Amino acid sequence: MIDLGISKLALIGVVALVVIGPEKLPKVARMAGTLFGRAQRYINDVKAEVSREIELESLRKMQDEVQQAAQNVNQSINQGWQDVSNDVGSVFSDAPSVNTPAPSTEFVADQTSFIRKRETFRRKKLTRTSALPQWYKNRQQTRQHVISGSARMAKFRANGRRPVSFF
């Protein structure tokens, strides 16, 4: 690096004053400062771009490794499943035939309804307790105000009777 001391900077300033002149020296110094700043910003941008590319390349390598590991796990699971199904098939083919009823689908339907109820409960709880904007809550169609059953009946009464007052 260039070693600039105070004496060298003073000598450069005196030579610039003599060569450029006192009228144009502030304008030239301002322009030199802006060019120096631009150069520094450009160098910093190039350094940041190179570091981003290096990080991106390492992330790509990591992604390939994870995908390869996932494929290996998937293949091993499929191979294990094939082995188990072959073993079970051979056991059932050796066993005498027994009349067994087909498995019912009630449990599957019950489990899907349970999952659906669980998801709607979580969504409703999130909209009720979080600091979500009102337009989002309205879009999700969740109740904002809880009213009693009698008030709900009065609100949605089929006939057009008006409530009778006490007075």
Image: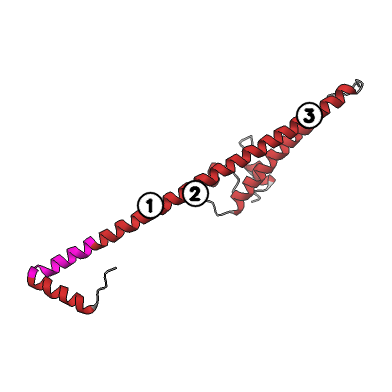
Which residue, given by chain and number where applicable, does mark 1 sit on?
A: 49
Circle 1 Cα neighbour tier, 10 Å, few/some/many (<14 / 14–19 / ≥20): few
- Quadrant of the rendered image containing residue 21: bottom left
The range drawn in magenta is 19-35
x 72%, y 33%: residue = 79
The Cα–Cα distance between marks 2 and 1, rounded to whole angstroms, is: 14 Å
Choose the circle earlier in sequence order: 1 or 3: 1
Q: Are marks 1 and 3 in contact (CB under 8 Å)?
A: no
| Of the pair 154 and 62, the residue shown nearer to us | 62
Circle 2 Cα neighbour tier, 10 Å, few/some/many (<14 / 14–19 / ≥20): few
Instruction: State how many labels appear.
Output: 3
The residue type indicated by label 2 comes to Ser
- Residue 139 locus on image (x, y percent): 53, 42
- Residue 144 locus on image (x, y percent): 59, 49
- Residue 145 locus on image (x, y percent): 60, 49
x 22%, y 62%: residue = 34
| Of the pair 9 and 103, the residue shown nearer to us | 9
Q: Secondary structure at mark 3?
A: helix
The residue type indicated by label 1 comes to Glu
Which residue, given by chain and number where applicable, does mark 3 sit on?
A: 85
The residue type indicated by label 3 comes to Ser
- Residue 5 locus on image (x, y percent): 24, 77
The Cα–Cα distance between marks 2 and 3, rounded to whole angstroms, is: 40 Å
Q: Secondary structure at mark 1?
A: helix
Q: Is residue 20 magenta?
A: yes
The Cα–Cα distance between marks 1 and 3, rounded to whole angstroms, is: 53 Å
Q: Which mark is residue 158?
A: none
Can you say whether 154 is above or below 49 in the image?
Answer: above
Which residue, given by chain and number where applicable, does mark 2 sit on?
A: 58
Choose the circle earlier in sequence order: 2 or 3: 2
